[in-house]
Amino acid sequence: MRIFWLPFVIALLINVAVDYYIYRKLTTLRRVGNALSQLHIVLAAVAHITMIAALLQPVFSHDYTWQDMTTVMKVIWFYAMFYVPKVLWALLYQLSRPHSLPRWLRVSAKAVALVVAMVAFCAMWKGYFVTPYQCEVTTTVFESKRLPAGFDGYRICHISDMHLGTYDNDTTFIAQCIDTINALQPDVIMFTGDLVSRTTDEAYAFTPQLSRLKARDGVIAVLGNHDYDFYTTLNDEQKKEDHQELCNLIKEVGWRLLGNENMMLHRGGDSIAVVGTENYSRGHMPNHCDYKKALHGVYGNKTYTILLQHNPQLWYDEVLGFSFTDLTLSGHTHAMQCKLRFFGTTVSPAALFYDQWGGFYNALGQAIYVNTGLGMVGVPARIGATPEITLITLKTMAR
């Protein structure tokens, strides 16, 4: 686990300052002020020490596992769950400080500070305990003049980013998602990568559930960036062995794994191509994608084509305007596990890093759908960005 110390040190110093500010406020309370201020200092000290101990664990541990990483991320989230509201309250409370303000305005500012802090705490609490297990089915229609008539009404269930290590071998949520998918009775299920977060052993407990996924044309899958070499303590040979083990597991549960290759789906006398590419990267991670190789044998603009690629950046870099791929399915972004709606507009911090981060995007007669995933990576929480199962119905547009 790579730790960026500077942000944590800055956050820790800010939180200590806020705790001291709250301590000073509590001491001014009559009767209970001393007791509350002392209790606050004890709880704050425990929180800070626990946080520091969690951050130091991967530094001094010689057998650090993905379960240990999950535990550390949980500690970080619980620490943030209490300190983000505290910091927001302290900052907004300052608006009530100028004595030149009318009394009603100062009281209102204090009330706003308290409400914002409470909302932040509730959102983070829900983001950990509730939202990650509220899987939603998104239904959408994609129309195209190029779609063969035999595939009119064809239903694709698109899923992505399971990150099975998230669940500590508890299969309950994944089993519920699979029940939901099977109940949709799709024609095909397409998975766009990141089955695990670090190593193949995360998936062992889930193989009976994964093998239950059923569709008329089966399950077609590609790999994501986490399906390669995210366990940094393994040597190169061990990484290769683990990667091959994951590929074997995917095939053993009955999924068709595409690695820079394509296959055809048939309905009567009509056919469409499904092109599957390995994970694409712009350079900060290894690039395993060979889009041209994957297209080999697909006859240009004569064949309706669906591309499966984990990283949506490939669509902008190499697909849009450069090929005849009609529909691209991707994941990867998770909407950064934070998606908020304001007056009919959906916003996410993922928009700062990805031009296409969630949902449908159309340009130049080509489209991409970015699924926000089922599992989690990094912080074990989702703020508004519920786990997603996408049901896409293909429709033939009149020529």
Image (tube, helix red, strand yellow):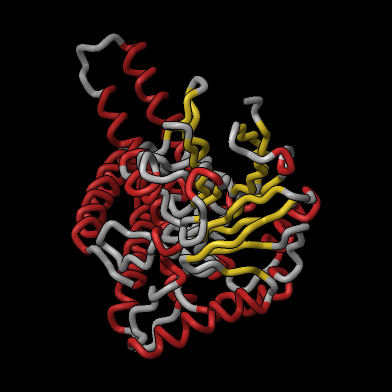
In the image, is 210 to the left or to the right of 13? right
Front-lying residue, 358 or 21? 358
Residue 19 point in image, percent of width and height: 29, 49
User: In the picture, which quadrant includes the N terminus?
Assistant: bottom left
Residue 306 point in image, percent of width and height: 55, 49
Residue 298 point in image, percent of width and height: 51, 56
In the image, is 333 to the left or to the right of 373? left
As drawn, 123 above or below 307: above
Residue 229 point in image, percent of width and height: 38, 76
User: In the picture, which quadrant includes the C terminus?
Assistant: top right
As drawn, 197 above or below 31: below
Front-lying residue, 16 or 376? 376
In the image, is 180 to the left or to the right of 232? right
- Report the residue at 47% width, 80% height from top: 243
| Rendering quarter of residue 13 | bottom left
- Report the residue at 49% width, 38% height from top: 367
As drawn, 193 above or below 136: below
Front-lying residue, 246 or 339? 246
- Report the residue at 58% width, 63% height from top: 221
Residue 126 visible within the image: no
- Report the residue at 24% width, 63% height from top: 4
Residue 147 visible within the image: yes
As drawn, 175 above or below 203: above
Number of on-image labels: 0
